[in-house]
Image (spheres, helix red, strand yellow):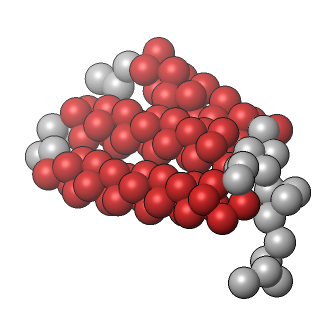
Amino acid sequence: MFNYINLFLSMLMFMSGIVVYVLKRKHLLSTLLSLEFIVLSLFYLLFLMYMNYNYEYYFTMIFLVFSVCEGALGLSILVSMIRTHGNDYFQSFNVLEC
């Protein structure tokens, strides 16, 4: 039987991650953290679904590998932006600069 409290908790995590992503869009670091929180809530929901239907958890490991790669790519973009512009504000970032 599917536990509705865990489903509600996962959906609450997902929605709060989206709200933080929409409201805190000034800094790249806060958007990256909220995206990682959204991925974590999706992983929790996926794990609950597989646990409910007694499936294997192999796909959750693949999902975690892709989420780690996404986090590493986001951090590398953050580091390169801080090195070139000095901060992580989106307002100071100009696409036309070399």
Relative to 76, is 66 on the left or the right? Answer: left
Residue 15 % position (x, y): 66, 34
Residue 58 % position (x, y): 14, 51
Query: Residue 72 versus residue 86: which sits nearer the camera?
Result: 86
Residue 61 % position (x, y): 20, 49
Residue 60 % position (x, y): 24, 48
Query: Residue 90 versus residue 41: which sits nearer the camera?
Result: 90
Give residue 72's quadrant in the image.
bottom left
Look at 26% across and 33% down and name the residue there: 52
Look at 62% across and 43% down and name the residue there: 29
Relative to 89, is 72 on the left or the right? Answer: left
Q: How many marks?
A: 0
Look at 72% across and 60% down and name the residue there: 85
Query: Residue 76 versus residue 23: which sits nearer the camera?
Result: 76
Q: Residue furthest top?
A: 5
From what the image shows, is residue 59 above or below residue 5?
A: below
Look at 66% across and 39% down and name the residue there: 30
Give residue 13's quadrant in the image.
top right
Whether residue 13 is visible here, answered yes or no, is yes
Relative to 80, is 56 on the left or the right? Answer: left
The N terminus appears in which quarter of the rendering?
top left
Whether residue 15 is visible here, answered yes or no, is no
Query: Residue 1 versus residue 68: which sits nearer the camera?
Result: 68
